[in-house]
Image (tube, grey):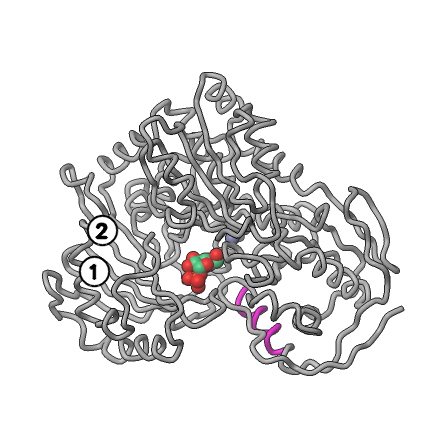
Amino acid sequence: MIRTISSAPIAGQKPGTSGLRKKTSAFMEPGYLENFIQSIWNGIGGVQGKCLVVGGDGRYFNTKAVQIILKMAAASGASKVIVGQGGLLSTPAASHLIRLKKADGGIILSASHNPGGLDGDFGVKFNTSNGGPAPEAVTEAIYQASLGLSEYLILEAADLDLSNVGLTRLADMTVEVVDPVNDYADLMEKLFDFEAIRTLFSNGFTLAFDAMHAVTGPYAHEILVRRLGADETSVLNATPLPDFGGGHPDPNPVWAHELMTKMMQPDAPDFGAASDGDGDRNMILGRQVYVTPSDSLAVIAANAHLAPGYVKGLAGVARSMPTSSALDRVAEARGLECHATPTGWKFFGNLLDAGRATLCGEESAGTGSDHIREKDGLWAVLMWLNILAKRQISVAEVMRNHWQEFGRNYYSRHDYEELDATAAQELIDELRQRLDQMAGQELGALTISAAEDFSYKDPIDGSITTGQGIQIHFIEGARLVLRLSGTGTSGATLRVYMERFNSGPSGLESDPQEALAEVITACEKLTSLRQRFGRERPDVIT
Ligand code: G1P
Ligand code: ZN
């Protein structure tokens, strides 16, 4: 029986950088999830007769939320929902399924790398029929729908058993439970030279992949161990847990310190990698080497042709504005079109759809290509394995050669977390007001050449997005970016991104924080942020 439940708008159901993210406890409040799901249906013109993909990263409340969404889809007349077995789907696998099954869209349940559990975070993201995160116009329509919501529809029915693959029904709606891993693994097998990677492993190459107790465990096991022959023990923390084992499933040197420590030993495995809660982020390591996400993106751009899926070369490349311009160096040398977009994967969608970019990436450990419309953690790992298998050199040598050829963009991001939201916004507003007077200003050893509040005009649909971060260029070949996070759930997080180019051939092996010391000083002189917020140092340095 379909029930119409009267409701009222709930404040703050505004999707951010990547869907709606809130405390799990907020999402579990009566009607909270239901209101947002109904707002999605209303915002996209209903789901009558439509086919949707649904799945999540397995965090606390995932199973319950999937059942609610199924009942709400059935109540609003959806014809079919394709759901991952047990309600699980990594974000890249969900994106792939939407495309493969020609679905009208999908709902991904995840708060990405944010901790899970009752005290952690939960999130809901709507992806469109191209498999990618809904663009701004769609998320805005969903938000507007949430503001005018007066009721939601839900089927009164028992929960479905999602533990077995196969077809079942919920009232008039078909529910297809699919293996979450297989189709995705098949896609990877088409893109990369599995034969070469298998040979690499059979010749004794060693790997440590940290799934961080999140969704990629089963994917990594199937692909790396079963299909490619890596040793069983290569996949660490492989069992997905609702609270990620109490950890913070973010693959960076701070949160993946266990793997980091292992890889910094002289007898470490040849290659190390990790992925996040929902499997779209990655961290790349070699024996005693950490590869920054920005460098990884540049290396992939320079070497992608070694993988069968990319032998024809790249149509173009794109990075988010705060990401280092290491990618631009490769693009320039190879004559590739190169785009800088606002932060968030949704801004790559149009470029990928239009064939203007094959490869995209963000400094926040996201890399991907036009094979799907999300960033893809395991894809990046396989791309690196493919490069290493073909080039037969170590990760350290790949990096050394890359910097010799293209120069090195020293890069780091400093995060100040849980700041007072008003005070953080005031800092950005103040900087905005001073932008016009900044050119020529000396900040210690550096002089500002240009300053702007980044805005982006989408070259495909002409849409304009403003206020995307304060970007300051220095004549010495350095850059400073300040922006507020759009994915946090409490207070404000200020992200400070710093970059400085060294063309080599000497000075290519310095410590990044030392190489960036003058940019760090310039930032402090410009903003006095440490004093202003009473912080001695950033909370997270990546
Ligand atoms: C962060 C990252 C951004 C990424 C997003 C979703 O957003 O900075 O690159 O696309 O998470 O994974 P932010 O919190 O900075 O808005
Ligand atoms: Zn993620």
Q: Which residue is mark 1?
A: 520
Q: Residue 442: image x %, image y %?
A: 11, 68
User: Which secondary structure dominates the residues rendered in magenta?
Assistant: helix
Residue bounds of the magenta highlight = 134-144
> Does residue 458 appear anywhere in the picture?
no
The residue shown at (35%, 57%) is 540
Disc nearer the start of the sequence (2/1): 2
Q: Residue 1: image x %, image y %?
A: 89, 68
Three-letter amino acid code of the residue under disc 2: Gln
Q: Is residue 399 left or right of residue 316?
A: left
The answer to whether the beta carbon of the residue marked 1 is less than 8 Å from any atom of ligand 1 is: no
Q: Residue 69: image x %, image y %?
A: 73, 62
Q: Secondary structure at mark 2?
A: helix
Q: Is residue 487 above or below residue 176?
A: below
Q: Nearer the viewer, residue 294 or 63?
A: 63
Do the residues under discs 2 and 1 have CB atoms within 8 angstroms? yes
Q: Which residue is mark 2?
A: 513
Would residue 516 be counted in the magenta stretch?
Answer: no
Q: Is residue 14 above or below residue 501?
A: below
Q: Residue 533: image x %, image y %?
A: 29, 73
The residue shown at (29%, 35%) is 399
Q: Nearer the viewer, residue 152 or 489?
A: 489
Label 1 neighbourhood size at 10 Å, few (<14), some (14-19), many (20+)? some
Say which mark, if any, is on residue 88: none
Q: Secondary structure at mark 1?
A: helix
> Does residue 486 appear anywhere in the picture?
yes
The tally of labels here is 2
The residue shown at (30%, 47%) is 326
